[in-house]
Image (spheres, coloured by chain):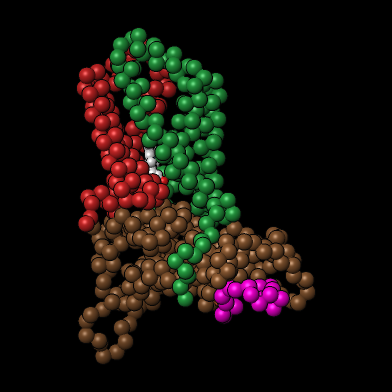
């Protein structure tokens, strides 16, 4: 039996219960995109850091502002979560921790450690 | 029609580049943490020292490859109209190429 | 017991809506499907599929309180009220909880779900050693219910071209079969941007498989086989 060509589909993401692995995974994507969006800024910072003592001092001052510190904390979270989820991912590829129980625990672990690293960075730069 | 960087090959590029990114970032972050706070002269000497300049260039090469595969995956998932998708991927490719040239210039001139 | 059920009638042309039902307990129903059958006695316009009522035929997959599962093996006691039932996410709805499985089976056929062997038939059966047979464990048990594919975000975004976890688990089932001679072709077929490589190892598939299978692991195994095949 076929549906009409204009048949409705149920796909309301707010009415679907996502397992922890899905949360970890969407975090991997979001953090990857955040990191990618920050790369031009990082390259610009690299440029300034090598453009003489004055430019270097100005960069250091910019990083010490509230906006600079916030950026550092966000990037620390993104990098920590992305790298940890990436390692989990590659281990799963080679069949380490591929069972559902282990994968759930490692997803929790990645989310928690990512959060802890972000908090620790916030405390450090504050 | 099979583009060069799809399927298994793209997947492999993603993993190999990730391994180098991880290795380099851990090393660089540890170095910066140990030498904090750093003077401008110290920083410049480190970045331009033998080996480090090349390792940094390789890092950005791996990063751009990693970003291309990763962002293309994201675009394929969410951007459906073929024309828009081609345009977005084109802009992305140009942007990454520009970033690569800029980074190379910075590191060569430094 | 309170129920909230997705209703859609293609004849009326009205948008789908949620309808509340109340079922007096006490008729010895244990599983969600038992309750649905009694609700159907109250309101025979309510449509859903079922056949074996014991987790074998794979026809009563649906979204139950936000997760996909088979109504016939979901104990009522495990469900929070109101029990909210919707059709499999992203599948075209024919009526109420009944969805169109055409594309799902098209993807299944695409992986050639049969042993390919062009050699002349042997005198006797094509035998397997017990070890070769054991390679099929965790793969052959699939009942094609589509709980997994209907819960896979990669499939939601690419239903036309990504084959989805159920078809890929079956792809691994025939790659793993010692009697099949088309392993190379099978691996090359799957090596493009979409058919297999949309999988991001989210593992939503494994979370909801009512047979306890692990499609994500099968997909990872196919990738490893591809890697070996390339070198
Ligand atoms: C620092 C800069 C980095 C950027 C800008 C970046 C960016 C990205 C992006 C945009 C994706 C695609 C995400 C998706 O498809 O959902 C991705 C995927 C991935 N990243 Fe990164 N990444 C970086 C670092 C790393 C590191 C250090 C690792 C180390 C473990 C890593 C491991 C991975 C893996 C394994 C994938 C593939 C995921 C998949 O196939 O589903 N990345 N990355
Ligand atoms: S692991 Fe792959 S197939 Fe399974 S739900 Fe996730 S993306 Fe889909
Ligand atoms: S793998 Fe499991 S969830 Fe998917 S179709 Fe087969 S039995 Fe159903
Ligand atoms: S009725 Fe057959 S699987 Fe549920």
Q: Main secondary structure of the magenta part?
A: loop
The foreground one among C87 and A6 is A6
The foreground one among A107 and A70 is A70
The quarter of the displayed image where residue B1 is located: bottom left
- Badge count: 0
C37 in magenta: yes
Instruction: Please name the color used to draw chain B.
Output: red
The quarter of the displayed image where residue C184 is located: bottom left
The foreground one among B82 and A60 is B82
Q: Which residues are magenta?
A: C35-55
The vertical placement of B81 against A69, above or below, is below
Determine the residue positioned at 52% across, 22% down: A124
State which quarter of the image contains the C terminus of chain C.
Answer: bottom left
Kindly tell me whether residue C195 is visible in this rendering: yes
Which chain appears green? A
What x and y, as percent, mark residue C144? 46, 72
Instruction: Please name the color used to draw chain C.
Output: brown
The vertical placement of B31 against C73, above or below, is above
What x and y, as percent, mark residue C95? 55, 70
In the image, ligand 1 is in what quadrant? Answer: top left
C135 in magenta: no
The vertical placement of C132 against C79, above or below, is below
């Amino acid at each position: 039996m076929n549906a009409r060509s204009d048949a409705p589909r149920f796909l309301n993401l707010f009415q679907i219960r996502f397992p922890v692995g899905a949360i970890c995974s969407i975090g991997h994507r979001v953090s990857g995109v955040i990191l990618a969006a920050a790369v031009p800024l990082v390259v610009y910072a690299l440029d300034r850091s090598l453009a003489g003592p004055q430019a270097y001092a100005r960069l250091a001052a910019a990083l010490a502002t509230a906006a600079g510190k916030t950026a550092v904390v966000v990037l620390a979270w993104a990098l920590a979560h992305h790298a940890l989820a990436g390692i989990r991912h590659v281990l799963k590829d080679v069949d380490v921790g591929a069972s559902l129980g282990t994968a759930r625990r490692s997803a929790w672990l990645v989310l928690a450690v990512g959060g802890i690293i972000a908090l620790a960075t916030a405390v450090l730069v504050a | 029609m099979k583009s060069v960087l799809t399927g298994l090959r793209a997947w492999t590029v993603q993993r190999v580049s990730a391994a180098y990114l991880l290795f380099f970032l851990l090393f660089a972050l540890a170095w910066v943490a140990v030498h904090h706070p750093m003077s401008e002269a110290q920083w410049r000497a480190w970045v331009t020292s033998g080996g480090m300049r090349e390792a940094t260039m390789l890092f950005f090469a791996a990063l751009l490859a990693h970003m291309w595969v990763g962002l293309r995956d994201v675009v394929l998932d969410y951007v459906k109209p073929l024309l828009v998708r081609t345009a977005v991927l084109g802009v992305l490719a140009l942007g990454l190429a520009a970033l690569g040239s800029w980074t190379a210039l910075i590191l060569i001139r430094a | 017991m309170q129920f909230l059920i997705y209703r859609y009638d293609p004849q009326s042309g009205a948008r789908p809506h949620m309808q509340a039902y109340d079922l007096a307990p006490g008729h010895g129903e244990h599983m969600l499907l038992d309750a649905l059958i009694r609700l159907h006695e109250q309101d025979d316009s309510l449509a859903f599929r079922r056949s074996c009522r014991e987790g074998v035929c794979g026809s009563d997959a649906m979204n139950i309180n936000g997760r996909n599962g088979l109504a016939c093996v979901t104990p009522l006691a495990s469900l929070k009220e109101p029990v909210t039932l919707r059709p499999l996410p992203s599948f075209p709805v024919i009526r109420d909880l009944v969805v169109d499985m055409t594309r799902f089976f098209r993807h299944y056929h695409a992986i050639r779900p049969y042993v390919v062997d062009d050699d002349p038939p042997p005198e006797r059966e094509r035998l397997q050693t017990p070890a070769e047979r054991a390679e099929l464990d965790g793969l052959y048990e699939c009942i094609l219910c589509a709980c997994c594919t209907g819960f896979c975000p990669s499939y939601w975004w690419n239903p036309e071209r990504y084959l989805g976890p159920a078809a890929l688990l079956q792809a691994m089932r025939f790659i793993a079969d010692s009697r099949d001679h088309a392993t190379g072709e099978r691996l090359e077929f799957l090596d493009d941007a979409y058919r297999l490589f949309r999988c991001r190892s989210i593992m939503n598939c494994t979370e909801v498989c009512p047979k306890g299978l692990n499609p994500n692991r099968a997909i990872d195994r196919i990738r490893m086989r591809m890697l070996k095949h390339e070198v």
